Amino acid sequence: MRKIPSYLPIATNNIRRWLNNPRIFILAALLFILLWEFLHPILAFSNAVGYRVSPWLFPFLSSYSYTQRIMMFGIVLLFCDAPFAHEGQPYVIIRSGRIHWTLGQLLYIVVSTALYFLFINILICLILFPNLVYTDDWGKVLSTLAQTSAAQEFHIGLPINYAIQLRYTPISAFLISFLLEWLVGIILGLIIFIVNLYCNRQALGAAAGSAVILLDIVIHNDMSDFIYHFSPVSMARLTILDTTGLNMQPTILYSFLFCMGTIIVLAAIAVLSVRKREIRISRPV
């Protein structure tokens, strides 16, 4: 029981290292550029029509395959140095034990993934801040963009899907999309962790995570919609989920159960793998 408190310091120490890691600042800059490209035209439209825009844009960003892929590749960049065994870690492993050290690293993946998507939503609010207004409905700007041709006239590249507005309230759409993106980000982090642990090559873990992300494109182009049941990245998009029970696409409940089950299995594999394999110290990426 004395080792239980070591989980949190191990995770927080990894997050503290972000301040000295240029890769994290590069990732933050890339996210800002991506969001600015897609949100600035919406801000311009808001100025033109004289209505403020509501903050509920994350469900549309996560449901549009292009922007979602970029955000998920950001997860790959965030965790590409898994299993996070840098200098000083041998001492931590000896003091805490392999199992506790591994649980601390898994906690780091869970917490940092949540912080990653929280940061994206903070950037959304900052970019829209001049015209941002909180409302519990979709608002005039997003409703107009979803139901008219104004998006084409103002060269808005982010699809504001009207089906999402019909099927979900803004808060439910945000919570479902955020939680599913969070769970999928954890899955990607665990896959990278396990592959890098077994192969001792960080590039292979990033390649495995990227393959999971790109499966969504393969299914869309060449496979039956039923295969979406095995693509976690696809199941995080509201436009893929079946709310009627009348088609072959996964339901919201199935998506949550699949993602949580996959996380449990991958976490168990990670813990058992660390017990049996040598942990090599790597240079920071």
Image (cartoon, helix red, strand yellow):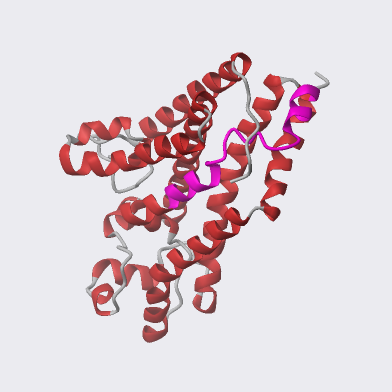
Q: Main secondary structure of the magenta part?
A: helix
Tell me if 103 is positioned left or right of 125 in this view: right
Report the residue at 53% width, 29% height from top. 200
Q: Is residue 272 above or below residue 115?
A: above
Q: Nearer the viewer, residue 233 or 166?
A: 233
Residue 86 falls within the magenta-colored stretch: yes
On the question of residue 51 being in view, the answer is yes
Quadrant of res 232: top left
Report the residue at 65% width, 53% height from top. 21
Residue 159 falls within the magenta-colored stretch: no
Quadrant of the image containing the N terminus: top right
Give the x, y percent position of residue 124: 50, 65
Tell me if 40 is positioned left or right of 86 in this view: left
Q: Is residue 143 above or below residue 112?
A: below
Tell me if 234 is positioned left or right of 170 in this view: left
Q: Is residue 194 above or below residue 39?
A: above
Report the residue at 23% width, 72% height from top. 148
Q: Which residue is situated farthest in the right direction here?
A: 2
Give the x, y percent position of residue 222: 16, 39
Q: Which residues are magenta?
A: 71-95
Report the residue at 50% width, 33% height from top. 201
How many numbered circles does the render carry? 0
Give the x, y percent position of residue 160: 32, 63
On the question of residue 246 being in view, the answer is no
Q: Which residue is situated farthest in the top direction here?
A: 276
Q: Is residue 212 above or below residue 279?
A: below
Give the x, y percent position of residue 94: 78, 22
